[in-house]
Structures are given as structure tokens and as C-alpha cells.
Image (tube, grey):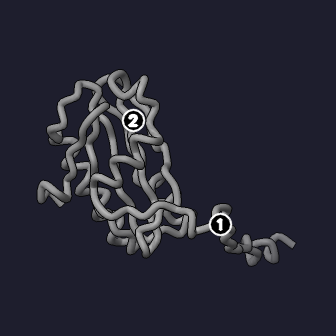
């Protein structure tokens, strides 16, 4: 009886049930439009207090599938787990993502850690055929786009 148990495996089934009409979704056309969507999802009372990391999920037409709150950290950093980011992206069946985090200090200059994380996430995305379009660093009133600055 034990031998028969070895040949049984779990069954995997896939279903996809979008809950919002795609025609009502905004389209990202620039880093500025992405910034505006992120600002709408941010608690502006905390943007100068805690560092947070969010991801915008996009379909092939650059329509927004959702904004995901990936992590909340402290005053000077937050942790981003690539597995969590990409399992979320895969589950939403997205084609591309835009990364975003805030700098509570208001300084929009990317740190060395920001560059390393972005490079790592771009490489992970390539393996899964999920394009990382941009990485925004935002403050309460402005932003820096890695794509616009030529960092991607």
C-alpha cells in the first residue's frame, strides 16, 4: 500500500477570474501617469515617515491590473522578496510591472541598494517573461524614474 502512495501527486489547476471590467482600467502611458496612480494608492500621511514598496501590475495593453503593497519598512529601508513580487505578478497574469518605493527623506537619488535591487528584479522578470518597465522613487510631491534617467 505504501508503494502506491509514492505515485500519487497533487493536482494543479489554473483558473483566472478578473473581477473588474478591463475597459474601466487606467492605461499607463508615461512615468508621470504611473506616478499619479501610485500617489492615489499611497497613504500620504506616511510617505515622509516609513519606506514602502509597491508594484503596478500591467497587461499587454499597459492597462492597470492592480497596485500591490509589497512591503513596509522603517525610516531608511524596506525588504522586497522577489518571490513574493513575481508570484503576485504571475497570479494576476500580468505582462509587465512598474516598481515603486518612497524615500521618506524626500531625497529622490537612488541608493546603491536601489540599483542592485532593480537589476535583480529586472533579471528575475526576464526569466519569467515579465518586463520591468520602470522603477519610481517617490516623495510626497515628486518622483524619479529609472527609465527616464536611463538607469534601466
The residue at 52%/66% (across/down) is 90
Res 128 seen here: yes
Instruction: Tell which of 111 and 145 is nearer to you.
Output: 145
Q: Earlier in the sequence, mark 1 or mark 2?
A: 1
List the residue tagged with mark 1: 18
Numbered label attached to residue 52: 2
Quadrant in which the N terminus appears:
bottom right
Residue at mark 1 to residue at mark 2: CA–CA distance = 26 Å
Question: Where the C terminus falls, by quadrant?
Answer: bottom left
> Residue 51, percent across and down?
35, 31
State whether residue 104 is above or below residue 26.
above
Q: Quadrant of residue 114?
A: top left
- Secondary element under disc 2, as helix, strand or loop, is strand
Q: Is 80 above or below relative to 2?
A: above
Q: Residue furthest left?
A: 150
Q: Nearer the viewer, mark 1 or mark 2?
A: 1
Residue beneath the point at 37% across and 25% down: 50
> Where's residue 111, x and y in %?
17, 39
**Residue at 43% in and 74% down:** 61
Amino acid at each position: 500500500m505504501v508503494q502506491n502512495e509514492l505515485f500519487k501527486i497533487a493536482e494543479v489547476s489554473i483558473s483566472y477570474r478578473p473581477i473588474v471590467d478591463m475597459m474601466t482600467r487606467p492605461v499607463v502611458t508615461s512615468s508621470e501617469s504611473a506616478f499619479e496612480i501610485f500617489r492615489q494608492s499611497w497613504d500620504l500621511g506616511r510617505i515622509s515617515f516609513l519606506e514602502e514598496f509597491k508594484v503596478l501590475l500591467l497587461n499587454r495593453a499597459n492597462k492597470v491590473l492592480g497596485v500591490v503593497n509589497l512591503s513596509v519598512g522603517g525610516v531608511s529601508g524596506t525588504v522586497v522578496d522577489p518571490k513574493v513580487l513575481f508570484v503576485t505578478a504571475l497570479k494576476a497574469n500580468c505582462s509587465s510591472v512598474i516598481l515603486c518605493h518612497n524615500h521618506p527623506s524626500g531625497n529622490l537619488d537612488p541608493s546603491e541598494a536601489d540599483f542592485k535591487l532593480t537589476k535583480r528584479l529586472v533579471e528575475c522578470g526576464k526569466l519569467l517573461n515579465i518586463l520591468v518597465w520602470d522603477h519610481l522613487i517617490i516623495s510626497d510631491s515628486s518622483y524619479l524614474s529609472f527609465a527616464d534617467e536611463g538607469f534601466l
